[in-house]
């Protein structure tokens, strides 16, 4: 009985950690950095990832994942840094899954102010 319980616990833990690792890595995203511009429709600053929902002119609604809460705060971004209706320029990595409207932001620019979440990953064209 104890062996079955321990084995079941180990399997569940492996699945949960594997999913978390896959999400928190970058393997799900394109290697190429791209830029998109949109209008902020929603702002969430909290766990597990702060994010913006934006509406783009050509590609519809996108989820913009920012850094983890600590990285987001270190970049100077908080719930008062932007407002719904603001224009935003996002530089980051799109999801490899073209069905997902998801981009992981390396940097965003709002009203001329830049917030860089991953300075070591920033590639300028």
Image: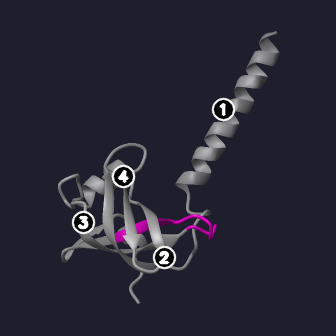
User: Taking 3 as reference, is 74 left or right?
Assistant: left
| Label 2 residue SS | loop
Between circles 2 and 1, the one closer to the viewer is 2
Point out the tag, 4 or 3, that comes first from the N-terminus.
Answer: 4
Span shown in magenta: 95-107
Name the residue beneath numbered marker 1.
Answer: 13
Position above or below: 80 against 123: above
Residue 50 image offset from top left, x and y in percent: 36, 52
Position above or below: 42 against 108: above
CA–CA distance in space, label 3 to label 2: 17 Å
Point out the tag, 2 or 1, that comes first from the N-terminus.
Answer: 1
Q: Is residue 101 magenta?
A: yes
Name the residue beneath numbered marker 2.
Answer: 59
User: Taking 67 as reference, is 19 left or right?
Assistant: right
| Label 4 residue SS | loop
Q: Which of 28 and 71 is in front in this view?
A: 28
| Label 1 residue SS | helix
Name the residue beneath numbered marker 3.
Answer: 85
**Residue 50, label in figure:** 4
| Residue in the picture at 58% in, 73% down | 30
Number of other residues with Cα within 10 Å of mark 2, as a class: few under 14, some 14 to 19, many 20 or more: few
Q: Which of 26 and 99 is in front in this view?
A: 99
Q: Which of 15 and 82 is in front in this view?
A: 82
């Amino acid at each position: 009985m104890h062996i079955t319980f321990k084995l079941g616990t180990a399997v569940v833990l492996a699945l949960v950690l594997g999913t978390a690792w896959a999400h928190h890595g970058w393997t799900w995203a394109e290697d190429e950095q791209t830029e998109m511009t949109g209008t902020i429709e929603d702002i969430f600053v909290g766990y597990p990832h702060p994010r913006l929902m934006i509406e783009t002119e050509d590609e519809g609604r996108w989820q913009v994942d920012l850094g983890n809460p600590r990285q987001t705060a270190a970049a100077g971004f908080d719930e008062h840094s932007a407002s719904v209706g603001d224009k935003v320029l996002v530089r980051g990595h799109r999801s490899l899954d073209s069905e997902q409207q998801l981009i992981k932001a390396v940097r965003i620019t709002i009203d001329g102010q830049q917030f860089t979440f991953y300075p070591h990953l920033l590639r300028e064209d």
